[in-house]
Image: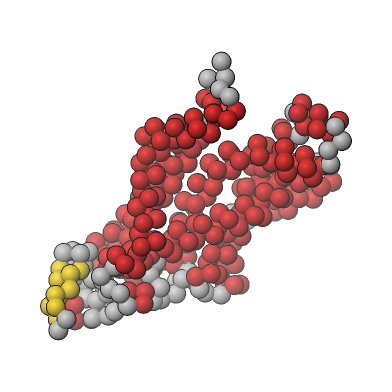
Amino acid sequence: MSEAPEDRPISAWKRLIQHPMGRWGGGILAVALMLALFGPWLVTDTTPHANSMDVEHAAMPVGSSVSGPDGTVSHWLGTDRYGRDLYSRLVLGTRISLGVGAVAVALSLLIGVPIGALAGYYGGWVDRVLNGAIQVFWSIPTFLMVIALGFALGKGVWQVFVAVGLTMWVDVARLVRGQMLQIRSLEYIDAARVLGYPSWRILVVHALPQTVSALVVLSASQFASALLLESGLSFLGIGAQPPIPTWGGMIRDHYPYLLTGQGHLVWIPGVALALLVLGFMALGTALRDALDVRRLER
């Protein structure tokens, strides 16, 4: 016997909580959100962007401390090549990474959902025109497009947000179009047409809600992709500019230190980036299983 419709969201939530990868991914995301929201109160370097330099104490090891006129300052993760506190910059970099992911996913949904919905629902010449545009953007390598938009929009935090977001809508549009091609032929859509409902109401009220589950899963994977794209741009020097701390920028500044016995300057932000990406991918896998219609009907 299938569950009542009003019980399905609760069951899906329970499935997500009980899913091992859901708990693991949700835990990582919770820690990252805490660092992003409360970072300014958690850092030991309270200067703007944690940019207090002390070249005399550059590249100090993990767990170091420095005595000064204001007392002893602890550097829990050591200092970077400019003597800045690595822990403080790592914490503040979380906000940039999550911000890029959030804006990129929002832009991709804002652009991709309407295009995919119109193409899939109406078909005909509308589908041919919009699907042609989708295929053109799909054929361009994502990273090259991000780099091109980065140069066109300029260097800066918001420019990176927009550049990454404008390259990810194609996946959303393709997904929604494919869903719409199936949904528009269902019996309840035909019944709505027979009842005389306008096309826009059928599309917005009756068809689009059926794509939410698939979009949630896709958004989780796109969030992870946005993190990697932003880190790649920062590594190449065309992302957020110094002194704004980013994980990609921290790796770029210190990758020569891998061969000098101070590899922690690279692998600490690298591990943080990998964990956050894996956390979103794990959460996406758990969401896919929790929102699976076949599972919910059992």
Residue that lies at the very extreme toward the bottom in this rendered image: 69
* Viewer-proximal residue among 168 and 290: 290
Residue 256 occupies quadrant: bottom left
Q: Residue at x 39, y 55 (%)?
A: 33
Left or right position of 87 against 192: left
Looking at the rendered image, the quarter that the N terminus falls into is: top right
Residue at point 29% right, 62% down? Answer: 266
Which residue corresponds to the image point at 59% horizontal and 43% vertical from the top-left?
215
Q: Nearer the viewer, residue 19 or 238?
A: 19
Residue 41 shown left or right of residue 55 in the figure? right
- Can residue 11 be spotted in the picture? yes
Q: Nearer the viewer, residue 146 or 47?
A: 47
- Eyeballing the image, is 9 above or below 58? above
The spot of residue 136 in percent (x, y) is 70, 53
Residue 56 percent across, percent down from the top left: 19, 81
220 shown above or below 252: above
